[in-house]
Image (tube, rainbow, N blue to C red):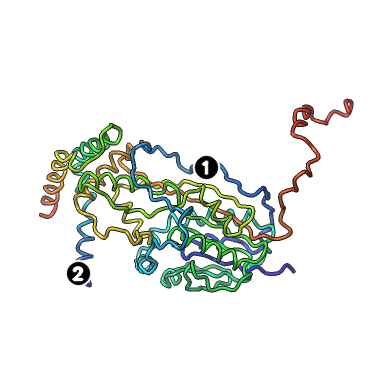
Amino acid sequence: MSSSNVWSRSRARMRLFPELLAQCSGEAAAYGKCVASTTTGKQELTKNMCVKEFEALKSCFQSAAKKGVK
Amino acid sequence: MPPPVRIFFGDGPGFESLAELQTDSGPCSRVRTAPVQVLPQTQSLLCGAGPRSLRCLWRGWRGLSSQGGVMNVFDRSMKRRQKQWASSLLDSDKYDYLRDEVGSRLADRVYDVSRSLPDIVERLFLTDISDSSLRNRKKCEMPTQCVLADEEFLPFKENTFDLALSSLSLHWINDLPGALRQIHQVLKPDGVFIGAMVGGETLYELRCSLQLAELEREGGFAPHISPYTAVTDLGNLLGRAGFNMLTVDIDEVQVHYPGMLEVMRDLQGMGESNCAWNRKSLLHRDTILAAAAIYKEMYGNEDGSVPATFQILYMIGWKPHESQAKPAKRGSANVSFADLSKISKFPTDPQKS
């Protein structure tokens, strides 16, 4: 690499994002369903309404990232 | 020998499809009809999008009605830098698919509308705010001239051009009424302006996913997609700028991507990143993750891809001239609508006259 700056490093990290997300498709679908259900229901979407599903997704994503780095 | 025509190009890359405009194309007249004609919405790909009825709180229409004075929504120098960066990419033609598609549809419209346009193109002026996009242009056999110009400050004299074209650049203009007025000025009388701009419900999937993700993760949301002009406002805008015999129609282009990140990367590669003054400079990692999950769940297709919708508004407007058809004077009618019921038989049978 000619110059490794914060932008090129963060772009390189973002390039891995889709593959990592693909490994967590189940958790992603669960989180998506939780949020989508609030749009059709009566309640407004507030902060941390789907925090459980999101934490599951995030931990799956982070463990996939750790596996990938090795 | 018909007088040569000068064509004024309003955007950089993507006009290469107009290089197909043959210099010996025969004129074919477009049917001139009454003032504003809104053609039915056509969909190029069937949009199997999910629930549009979800509550997307922030729309961000480009409001035109009550705000006097010039709106300053976009940072033009930032847009210039983004375009420079995008055209300096080594694989920048990978991102040209949308521009090529819209450019070819625009070229079709130019073919249709050649009533008063002579056959020979004298000169083609390509303008853009970024010089590297101009340098990136494809070769074409028409004599061209590149001009570095901002659409809101056109450096041309009045009554110079027979045809003005704009493809996918009007949605970054701050003062759209002013820009249209300037285009009107530089056109010759009976000149025509044909444009295509992104508008309406473009990228609603991305906008809604980001909105919901930010609401859920952060408790509030900021606009990430720039405000677009509605098709109903466009007729007004063109009329106020002085154009006659308007034609406005909508086309929807739906592109499928593997996921939300690819959508965003392609938008960046096209030079279409957000440059509004009110943009948030930071998008949290969690929000990106949440938005990607929501996008796939709410709008994803069965094969795992996600759609992104681009609604393209095409507009055609003519500068007034005496040769153009005017609405008939009041009281000059000599047939009545009631006579329509009397048209029951075709007058083909010679026996029954």
Write down the chain letter for disc 2: A
Residue B207 lies, in percent from the top left, at 33, 48
Disc on res. A4: 2
Q: Residue at x 28, y 32 (%)?
A: A42
The answer to which of B51 and A15 lies nearer the viewer is B51
Q: Identify which residue is drawn at 54% across, 57% down.
A: B195
User: Would residue B154 be found to the left or right of residue A57 on screen?
Assistant: right
Say whether residue B212 is left or right of residue B101.
left
Residue B345: image quadrant is top right
Question: Where residue B16 sits: x, y (%)?
Answer: 51, 63
Quadrant occupied by the N terminus of chain B: bottom right
Residue at the spot of label 1: B41
Measured as percent of width and height from the top left, residue B174 is found at 44, 62
Q: Quadrant of the C terminus of chain B?
A: top right
Look at the numbered disc 1 and give the secondary structure of its residue.
loop
- Three-letter amino acid code at the position of disc 2: Ser
Going by the numbered disc 1, the residue's amino acid type is Gln
